[in-house]
Amino acid sequence: MSIGYTIVVACETKNDFDEIRSNLDVLRNTDAIINCPPDRIVEFSRKNLPDVLIVFAHRRNEKLFEACKIIRQDVLLKSTPIIFIFDELNEQFIMDSLNAGISDYIISPVKKIDILAHMTWGLKKSKLMFELEMKEMLLKDLGVIDRETGLYTSKYIPMVFANQINLAKDYNYSVMFVSICIDDPYRNKTNNSYLSKVIKKCVRSSDLVGAAEYCTYYLLLPKTDLSGANVVLNKINKTLAGEFTVSTGVCELTQEMSYTSLSGIALKAMEEVSGNKDKRIPVFEAKKPDPAKPEPVKPSESMKTVNIEKPILSKKPLESTQSKNWIDKIQTNKKSYENFRIEFSKKIDNVITPVFYKKRDSLKLKYPSSIIIDLSASEKKCFFSIKEIYEETENILKITDSGLSNLVIERCLISHGKQSLTRTTVELEELDEIYLDHLLQDLFHQLEVVSDLEKLINTNNGI
């Protein structure tokens, strides 16, 4: 192989090859320009690893498209610039070629200045892509990017997202923050892996995507407004095609916001619709505060379903800003609340306690010496905890009576000294044996994923 650039030219005639070669005579003498038959593009590319691939596309040829797609999927060749030379301006032919993976194109007759300009750009792009891949490999080695999913890991999401937020403020462009989570009944390893791939497929290369925690993802969409964010969400829901449902919260960046406040508002929005059958997506839009009279951030809620095109916004205050008199009125309705407490007590005896003990017994039977399970059930709080004994990772489920005629379900994952908390509310009627069993099974699956329980057991047993 040459110590300079290597250029593979795929053409049918010697005249085509000579034409390209004569136009590249100003490049260094050490560059290698290799003639390649059109039906052997992939073979010659894998053998010579070219810096640029030039293809004479005199007529439409599906084999050329297939060769481009194979090159784009090859680990060593996927970043190689591919330049097609067309005989005439055929828009459909050009569009199909771009979809197949070409990087650039030239219309005949080929002028020296044109081929040199496109070649120079192709070589620069090849170098930039190589540097980008090297940096991405480094980030994977450091644990910033997950090797399997290609998403930012939870530990580094605040740092990476905050950097992009600061850039957006400096250059004054819009940013949308999106939080997405799989609804409780569908949370498992298979769906989690599938959703990460779907999200990656539906966003641009400039968008940031991070796996915040089990079955929850953060998206940061630079130079995007609310309508653009809805386009992304529509693509995700369309790609999921009813496999399972997700809840989503969206927040637009303002100059006063940090990563913490931006993500907090989006999460609040997501929590409000978690488990909502209508799958409404609240969109929280921060209002610029008046220095003389600070006001709390107020949300705007999208009333459309998952197939959102034009959201209808209506203002609705956060729970924390609602009138204390309104809460007092509910809590002082003693007759209604007493009935609720009686029904909740029955639910504890007939559903929660039996399911808790059944799940405890089945898990202890499978992992007799590797996990510790603690549980309790009372009129105010029901508690179920799973803890693995090797790294002391613990996942906790709490079901509490909020005093507002519904139940609060909290899940707290404790791993490596850090805690992550998710909170949802459900109606008392919704909490049946199947729903609770799904919650507990998902609780264990999440512990399994975080602690890699099977690996820990084998390691400590000397396997």
Image: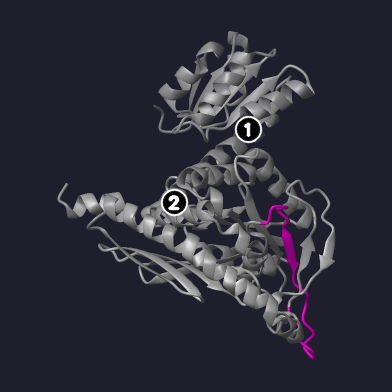
Position of 279 with respect to 387 (left or right) is right
> Which residue has dot 1 on it?
103
Whether residue 155 is visible here, answered yes or no, is: no
Vertical arrangement, residue 7 with respect to residue 248, above or below: above
Question: How many numbered marks appear?
Answer: 2
What residue occupies the far bottom of the structure in this picture? Answer: 292
Q: Secondary structure at mark 2?
A: loop
**Front-most of residues 156 and 266:** 266
- Depth order, front residue of 442/130: 442
Residue 404 x, y percent position in the rendering: 66, 75
Look at discs 2 and 1 and give the one toward the viewer. 2
Which numbered disc flags the more N-terminal residue, 2 or 1? 1
The answer to whether 277 appears left or right of 182 in the picture is right
**Where in the figure is residue 66, as x and y percent of width and height?**
57, 19
Residue 295 vs 218, above or below: the answer is below
Residue found 69% across the figure and 30% down from its top: 114
Q: Which mark is residue 230?
A: none
Pick the front one: 379 or 106: 379
Disc 1 crowd rating (10 Å Cα; few below 14, some 14-19, many 20+) is some
- The image quadrant that residue 46 belongs to is top left
Q: Measure how far apart labels 2 and 1 are at the Cα level.
A: 28 Å
Question: How busy is the neighbourhood of tag 2: few (under 14 within 10 Å), some, or many (20 plus)?
Answer: some
